[in-house]
Image (spheres, rainbow, N blue to C red):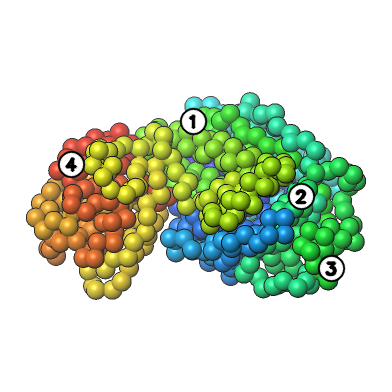
Amino acid sequence: MTNRSTDAGFDTEVIVIGGGPIGLTTACALAHHGVAFRLFEQRREPKPNSRANNLWARPQELLAAIGIRDALASRSHRIRQINTLLNGKTVEPIAIADVASPYPDVLYSGQDVIETVLAEQVQAKGGTVERGRKVVGLEQDEDGVWVSLATVGATDEHETEGPVEKLRCRYVVGADGHEGFVRKALGLDFEPEKLPNCMNRQVDAKLRWRRSTDFDHLWFFYYPRGFCGVLPVWEGYHRLFFLSDDTGLPDRDPTLEEMQAIAREVTQDETLTLSDPIWLTHSRFQHGVSTGYAKGRILLAGDAGHLTLPAGGQGMNAGLHDAVGIAWRLAMVLNERAQPIVLTSYDAERGGEHRRLDKQQEQGFRNSVYRGTLTDAAMRVAASFLPNIGELIQGTNDLQQLTVGYPDSPLNEDHLGRLRELLRRQVPHPGDRAPDADVIAADGTSTTLFAHLYNPDGHTWGWTLLAFDGQQAQALPQLRTAIAAASPWTFVRPRLVLGAALAQPDDAVVLSDLDGEAHAAYGMDGQPALVLVRPDGHIAFRAAAAEPELLLAYCNKVFGSSNE
């Protein structure tokens, strides 16, 4: 990492506040882009409990893009199927790994394992998790942010002792959780909505029952009073949780005997045995989203900006989108390769997505917990003919987060005719995740579009310009002109995706697509066209290849005047 700020009176470029999974991922992403940072965490030691414990496909793609996915996968179980029972009736299993992603298997371990691995990755990338430090003040001006930090007490991490240190940085990322300091200091706090008359009781323990204990399955049970999940965690343990009506339940952590009794009742397995518990807990439910995810030079990530419900394991995964989205933007800004729209788009995109997710989770939670006899009857009928009923009753048909997109992003620009697309299947538009596809490299080896979309040519925050020939042999002159229009911005890396045209040795990197897989994935058959993809793998711009002036105007708007 390089610190271009020290000579200008700054202690570092970015200060990350919070050393949970999202703060650690933000630090890893900043290090990946060569951005100097310091990371402060109030806790002296990592949390010992598993808490958030799964990684879906789309967040894995983002983690792979910054080089840390494989380290997490090496200490995780791979989930391929979700089994669901509705009041004792088996619903068709969900083949959760049957998705179009290089990382279809859901990874399960535990937040304690995830934090440990991420902290190791921060250190491997040259950073440090500075523990026992609490932020007590933030002051921002036109050029940077002053961060006041104190050392937490030796016996009480909520108290401070000793002198207060003031550090100056260019930007701050608040990843200090729902109860943290940053959101409140920015005036972006919110009043959570409480969901009445329900409770979660949970245990992490060793499990023996008459169903599979293999670590590649999840089990969900919808029973008259609520919803139960049986999930793997690391080192031979399973998690059992029960979201249910709280009538008659003591407002305290459950005992192992109580959890075993309700587990036997709900799973209809009187032999089920729990042993060696490592975590017993209970909680009630509330949710909400901050009115903004950024203010000036301070950005929020993960739980610092929202309070999520335990529906579909989406909360931590949503925060991983935040972490990666912040880092590439700050890298561009700090390298003076971005107009203000690049940074301000973060709030518009991620704030909007968190509000959408909040509604989805609430619906899934109500479907799971606040069910009556009529709802259950309707679900039983639906289960007989809807193959995705298991996902439906959890609030989404995309647990893997592959459809997360930003249709209203200020970075979007679309110049391809919508009327033409009405005549064909749905194709990805600006704001959507750019799909992967198999293609052939110039040397004849098999490759994929993803191999060229993330870190193109080793440029960590590079953008990729996909130039499709539309399977027309005479398209190359137009494509060359369009590529030349973007050439002043050297971080825009062109790729010729050719289904019919024959490139010359001095052309841009060629990806052959004679079978039309890439063209079909992007809806580009029959029309030479340009697709500009951001560093996080989302489409930003589309236009016909015959209109290179549109690409030129977009680059000037988003990146500023040509820089080389």
Mark before the other along the chain sequence, 4 or 1: 1
**In screen coordinates, is 339 left or right of 322?**
left
Image x and y of residue 15, in percent: 58, 43
Residue type for callout 2: Pro
The residue carrying mark 4 is 548
Quarter of the rendering containing residue 270:
bottom right
Front of the two marks 3 and 1: 3
Q: In the rendered view of the protein, which quadrant contains the C terminus?
A: top left
The amino acid type found where label 3 is placed reads: Glu
Residue tagged by mark 2?
Answer: 224
- Residue 210 in percent (x, y) is at 75, 73
Q: CA distance from mark 4 to mark 1?
A: 36 Å
Query: On the rendered structure, is 178 left or right of 542?
Result: right
How far apart in space, not on screen, are marks 2 and 1 (Cα)?
57 Å
Q: Which residue is mark 3?
A: 270
Q: What amino acid does circle 1 point to?
A: Asp
Secondary structure of the residue carrying tag 2 is loop
